[in-house]
Amino acid sequence: MAAALAAVESGDASAIVVAKLDRLSRSLVDFAFVMARAQVGHWNLVALDLGIDLSTAAGSWAGSNTERAHRIVSYEPYFVWPGG
């Protein structure tokens, strides 16, 4: 995985493609981190089993929702409950 990340971040590759999402990441937090790196680095991330492709509108939407889930799972402040 480290080699694949290095290749896309250096520009030697333009995407990481995995057949199954569990080959990329074992946790939602790790997946959200990789997806955020892809979005910031302007490289594509594709998971064939779930149909995730950041180069499409649907993939971009999935990425934005994964980022929200990452905030919740990692306990980062995302929203404040009224009165609390």
Image (tube, helix red, strand yellow):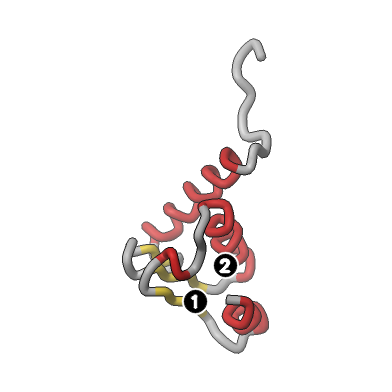
State the image coordinates of residue 39 (x, y, percent, origin top left).
57, 63
Residue type, label 1: Ile
Residue type, label 2: Ala
Q: In this view, which residue lies farthest toward the top?
A: 83
Residue 38: which disc? Answer: 2
64 relative position to 80: left or right: left
Q: Of the residues under marks 2 and 1, which one precedes in the sequence?
A: 1
Label 1, residues with CA under 10 Å away: few <14, some 14-19, many ≥20: some
Q: Do the residues labelled 2 and 1 touch (CB within 8 Å)?
A: yes
Q: Which residue is drawn at 49% across and 72% down?
A: 44
Q: Is residue 16 above or below residue 65?
A: below
Residue named by callout 1: 16
Q: Which quadrant holds the C terminus?
A: top right
Q: Which residue is drawn at 34% across and 70% down?
A: 48
State the image coordinates of residue 61 (x, y, percent, origin top left).
43, 53
Say what secondary structure mark 2 lies in. Answer: helix
